């Protein structure tokens, strides 16, 4: 394994990809050693099914970056060395991919392989024929334990949802009580407004009747004829008063 120059981003990425290729190769070896139908075999199969195409894509991008402007000063020898390094990665990935699909190619005929359309190992194939009675019993017990664990988790989720629903119901009841109280207060206020309006109408009617009565009394108190003529202060009430010029 070479030590990448930290000043060269291409070499840094190349070192990271080399580590990924090594991990893929190790996963293929571990999968080959694991028994078919076990959890470890299934996990490794899923991991490889995802990681191999991703690493292949990264290698292709690494090769394409050799034409970038930042690597224009590479010597032909250094460029050739880097291309050979990428080709080594591609070869390792191709071998890992073939090893990953080896059992499928060996156990499935050409017609069935063409019908599958992928050429990838089918993890759903029955592997119980290779297991003994004790191994089958252990596998069944393990599956039952997993189902019980899943049911326990599901029960906890249902209980939590039930508590949340109960809390929501309690809060809704409290809001309904507040709404009922507000409605009662609104009705009481409306009734008071109706009573006050009725009292104001009665007072207004009494005031109008009183003013009409006062006006009628004032009209009756007025005299019917012209006002009497009052005598002169110096004139006797028995003799009419005459002006001095008339005498």
Image: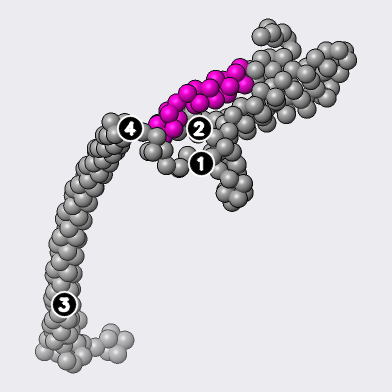
Q: Which residues are magenta?
A: 19-41
Q: Give the x, y percent position of residue 75.
A: 87, 13
Lower sequence index among marks 2 and 4: 2
Label 2 and label 4: CA atoms lie apart by: 23 Å
Lower sequence index among marks 4 and 3: 4
Element class at badge 1: loop
In this rendering, position of residue 33 left or right of residue 234: right
Lower sequence index among marks 2 and 3: 2
Label 4 and label 1: CA atoms lie apart by: 22 Å
The residue labelled by disc 4 is 132
| Residue 69 within the segment the image draws in magenta | no
Lower sequence index among marks 4 and 1: 1
Label 3 and label 1: CA atoms lie apart by: 99 Å
The residue labelled by disc 2 is 45
Q: Give the x, y percent position of residue 228.
A: 17, 88
In this rendering, the label closer to the viewer, 2 or 3: 2
Q: Which mark is residue 232?
A: none
The residue labelled by disc 1 is 122
In this rendering, the label closer to the viewer, 4 or 1: 4
Q: Residues within 10 Å of mark 3 (few under 14, many from 20)?
A: few
Q: Give the x, y percent position of residue 237.
A: 12, 86
When the figure is inspected, residue 213 is found, relative to residue 183, above or below; the finding is: below
The residue labelled by disc 3 is 205
Residue at (51, 41) in percent of width and height:
122
Kindly tell me whether residue 155 is visible in this rendering: yes
Residue 15 in which image quadrant: top right
Label 2 and label 3: CA atoms lie apart by: 98 Å
């Amino acid at each position: 394994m070479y030590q990448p120059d930290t000043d060269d981003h291409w070499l840094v990425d190349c070192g990271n990809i080399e580590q990924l290729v090594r991990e893929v190769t190790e996963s293929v070896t571990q999968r080959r050693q694991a028994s078919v139908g076990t959890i470890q075999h299934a996990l490794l199969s899923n991991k490889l099914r995802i990681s191999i195409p991703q690493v292949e894509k990264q290698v292709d991008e690494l090769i394409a970056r050799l034409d970038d402007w930042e690597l224009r000063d590479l010597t032909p020898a250094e460029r050739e060395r880097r291309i050979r390094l990428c080709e080594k990665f591609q070869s390792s990935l191709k071998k890992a991919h073939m090893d990953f699909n080896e059992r499928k190619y060996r156990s499935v005929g050409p017609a069935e392989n063409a019908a599958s359309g992928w050429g990838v190992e089918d993890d759903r194939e029955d592997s119980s024929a290779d297991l003994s009675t004790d191994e089958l019993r252990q596998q069944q017990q393990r599956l039952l334990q997993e189902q019980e664990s899943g049911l326990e988790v599901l029960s906890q989720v249902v209980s939590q949802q039930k508590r949340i629903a109960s809390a929501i119901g309690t809060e809704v009841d409290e809001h309904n009580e507040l709404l009922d109280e507000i409605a009662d207060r609104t009705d009481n206020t409306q009734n008071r407004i109706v009573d006050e309006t009725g009292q104001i109408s009665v007072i207004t009617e009494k005031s109008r009747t009183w003013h009409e009565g006062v006006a009628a009394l004032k009209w009756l108190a007025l005299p019917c004829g012209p006002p009497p003529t009052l005598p002169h202060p110096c004139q006797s009430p028995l003799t009419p008063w005459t002006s001095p010029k008339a005498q």
